[in-house]
Image (cartoon, rainbow, N blue to C red):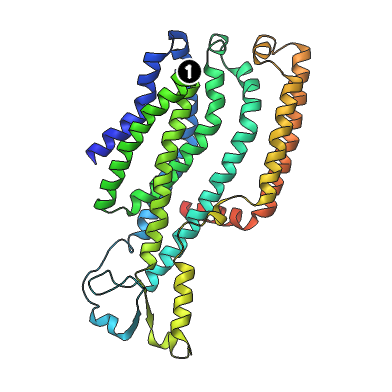
């Protein structure tokens, strides 16, 4: 864990080391301001969610992470054991009903949270870049408006949802990882740190994106970490269900074709992370895609130049342009949110119920 913590610290602070070597002093100040504002959102919103998720998964799945290698005890002789295809003697015991319930409950919760993350990604990418300059023109000091801080904060539209996604997936992974899994993840973190250095050169030097390139390099780094955690979660659930299940004889005494029933049940439960359950419905994607084009056309029409906005943000003409642009974005946002609510009523109710149950 010491090596892993060192590599994660290096990935977290690597952008600050890079900006000190590649940027001018004024832009370093702008990057620090943008980083502080962005991390403020992460600390207030994402970090509590990550901590609650880690505690929830750790407690609920603790019953599943104990692999019993010995033969069934006397208490288990009253049950019929149905083994999965890869479960043989010497392997972990089949899943009890309590373990099956824990796997089903946490899988549903994880899919609901990932579905929320995908909607958050659409929301930030669609609305944050076109409207952030208006907020900055009124609330950010003019000396920082002249730096790269505004463009860096716009790039956070991609960084924040990736940070949230990675935090959630790693919270699950660290809740169930074995010592062998931790070693594998440490190796992947090392590979991620190497790719981060390459991404810094690609975005900052080769593509000439400067401080914005550092943010995109961080996005790529977090994407690699989130990808590993997602693959791990998918394989972990499949590995758990392959252990088979324990069923009472009276539960299957009236089943004519119990093998076929059990096989179908195991095939259904054996799925890991399902993309179909975490991606927004097509109608939601269409609503955000149309809004994406509309708000950017509105920005180009009403506020074609950010520098002009920063210099004349309080003039009557510019205030009218800002108001028109905000009203158009508000209308698009309402349409998108209504479509999200229409298609995700059950998931919203489940998420609210989960939050309330954790608070009691």
The answer to whether residue 44 is above or below residue 200 is below
Give the residue drawn at x 37%, y 68%: 242
The reply to whether residue 307 is in sight is yes
In the picture, measured across the screen, residue 284 lies left or right of residue 316, that is left
Of residue 283 and residue 134, the one placed in the foreground of this image is 283
The quadrant in which residue 150 appears is top right
Q: Residue 40: x, y in percent?
A: 47, 29
Give the residue drawn at x 75%, y 23%: 323
Q: Residue 284: x, y in percent?
A: 67, 47
In the picture, measured across the screen, residue 159 lies left or right of residue 197, that is right
Quadrant into which the N terminus falls = top left
Count neighbours of disc 1 (C-alpha within 10 A) and say few if under 14, some if 14 to 19, many if 20 or more.
many
| Residue, disc 1 | 210
The reply to whether residue 33 is in sight is no
The answer to whether residue 284 is above or below residue 38 is below
SS type, badge 1: helix
Q: Residue 111: x, y in percent?
A: 51, 55
Of residue 81 and residue 349, the one placed in the foreground of this image is 81
The answer to whether residue 142 is above or below residue 174 is above
Of residue 44 and residue 264, the one placed in the foreground of this image is 264
Give the residue drawn at x 41%, y 51%: 231
In the picture, measured across the screen, residue 84 lies left or right of residue 159, that is left
Q: Residue furthest front?
A: 206
Give the residue drawn at x 71%, y 37%: 291
Q: Residue 128: x, y in percent?
A: 61, 30
């Amino acid at each position: 864990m010491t090596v892993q913590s060192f590599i994660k610290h290096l990935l977290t602070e690597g952008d600050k080391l890079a900006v000190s070597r590649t940027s001018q002093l004024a832009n370093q100040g702008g990057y620090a301001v943008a980083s502080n504002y962005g991390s403020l959102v992460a600390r207030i919103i994402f970090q509590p969610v990550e901590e609650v998720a880690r505690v929830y998964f750790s407690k609920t799945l603790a019953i599943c992470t104990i692999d019993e290698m010995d033969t069934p005890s006397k208490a288990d002789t009253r049950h019929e054991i149905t083994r999965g295809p890869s479960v043989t003697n010497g392997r972990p015991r089949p899943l009890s009903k309590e373990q099956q319930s824990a796997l089903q409950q946490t899988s549903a919760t994880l899919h609901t949270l990932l579905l929320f993350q995908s909607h958050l990604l659409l929301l930030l990418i669609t609305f944050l870049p076109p409207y952030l300059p208006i907020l900055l023109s009124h609330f950010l000091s003019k000396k920082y408006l002249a730096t790269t801080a505004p463009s860096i904060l716009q790039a956070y539209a991609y960084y924040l949802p990736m940070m949230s996604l990675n935090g959630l997936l790693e919270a699950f992974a660290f809740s169930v990882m074995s010592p062998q899994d931790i070693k594998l993840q440490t190796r992947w973190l090392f590979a991620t740190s190497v790719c981060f250095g390459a991404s810094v050169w690609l975005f900052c030097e080769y593509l000439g994106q400067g401080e914005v390139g550092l943010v995109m390099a961080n996005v790529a780094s977090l994407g690699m970490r989130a990808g590993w955690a997602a693959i791990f979660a998918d394989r972990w659930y499949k590995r758990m269900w392959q252990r088979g299940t324990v069923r009472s004889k009276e539960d299957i005494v009236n089943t004519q074709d119990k093998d076929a029933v059990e096989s179908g049940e195991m095939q259904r439960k054996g799925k890991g992370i399902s993309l179909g359950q975490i991606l927004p419905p097509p109608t939601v994607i269409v609503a955000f895609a149309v809004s994406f084009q509309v708000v950017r056309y509105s920005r180009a029409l009403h506020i074609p130049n950010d520098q002009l906005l920063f210099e004349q943000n309080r003039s009557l003409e510019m205030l009218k342009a800002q108001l028109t642009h905000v009203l158009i974005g508000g209308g698009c946002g309402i349409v998108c949110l209504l479509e999200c609510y229409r298609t995700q009523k059950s998931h919203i109710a489940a998420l609210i119920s989960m939050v309330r149950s954790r608070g009691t």
